[in-house]
Image: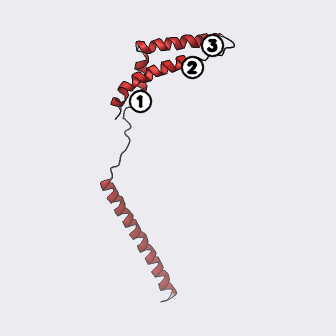
Amino acid sequence: MGVVSYLHHIRVSSCTHYFNKKRTMSFIQNFVARFVPIVKADDEEAELVDPQKVLRESCAEKPNCVKFHTRLTTCNDRVNSRKATEETCLEELIDYVSCVDHCVSHDLFSKLK
């Protein structure tokens, strides 16, 4: 086998290997496409809304939680009106957040998909 024949053999082998590899990849892609669904985002799809946020807003308006919010606001105003105080309104904040969380917990898991 001469040098020219040998170079021709290498070139042909390389091309054959390239086309076989390409054909194999095409087969794999087609096989995967057949069995794995491709999901594409819909540009016109409505914005997703966090159900917890919606429930928190509605629970915050309930009379029981409004009472705790009023106490928190009053405490916050009192603390902000003073120059130096050790009061933090932590108890009022915990009461308010607990009220809202308790209310949300009744309906949240039924809204999740």
For residue 86, side relative to residue 75 (left or right): right
Q: Nearer the viewer, residue 14 or 111?
A: 111
Asked whether the residues under the numbered discs 1 and 2 touch, taking CB atoms below 8 Å apart as contact, a structural biologist would say no
Identify whether 91 is placed above or below 19. Answer: above
Q: CA distance from mark 3 to mark 2?
A: 14 Å
Asked whether the residues under the numbered discs 3 and 2 touch, taking CB atoms below 8 Å apart as contact, a structural biologist would say no
Give the residue displayed 55% in from the left and 10% down from the top: 74
Q: CA distance from mark 1 to mark 2?
A: 27 Å
Element type where label 3 sits in the image: helix
Identify whether 105 is placed above or below 68. Answer: below
The residue type indicated by label 3 comes to Asn
Element type where label 2 sits in the image: helix
- The 10 Å Cα crowd at callout 3, few under 14, some 14 to 19, many 20 or more, is few
Residue marked by disc 2: 90
Q: Residue furthest bottom?
A: 1
- Name the quadrant containing residue 77: top right
The residue type indicated by label 1 comes to Asp
Identify whether 31 is placed above or below 48. Answer: below
Residue marked by disc 3: 80
Circle nearer the N terminus (3, 1): 1
- Which labelled disc corresponds to residue 69? none
Residue 21: horizontal and vertical position, in percent? 41, 68
Residue marked by disc 1: 50
For the residues carrying marks 1 and 2, which lies nearer the camera in this image?
2
Circle nearer the N terminus (1, 2): 1
For the residues carrying marks 3 and 2, which lies nearer the camera in this image?
2
Identify whether 104 is placed above or below 79. Answer: below
Q: Residue furthest left?
A: 34
- The 10 Å Cα crowd at callout 2, few under 14, some 14 to 19, many 20 or more, is few
Quadrant placement of the C terminus: top left
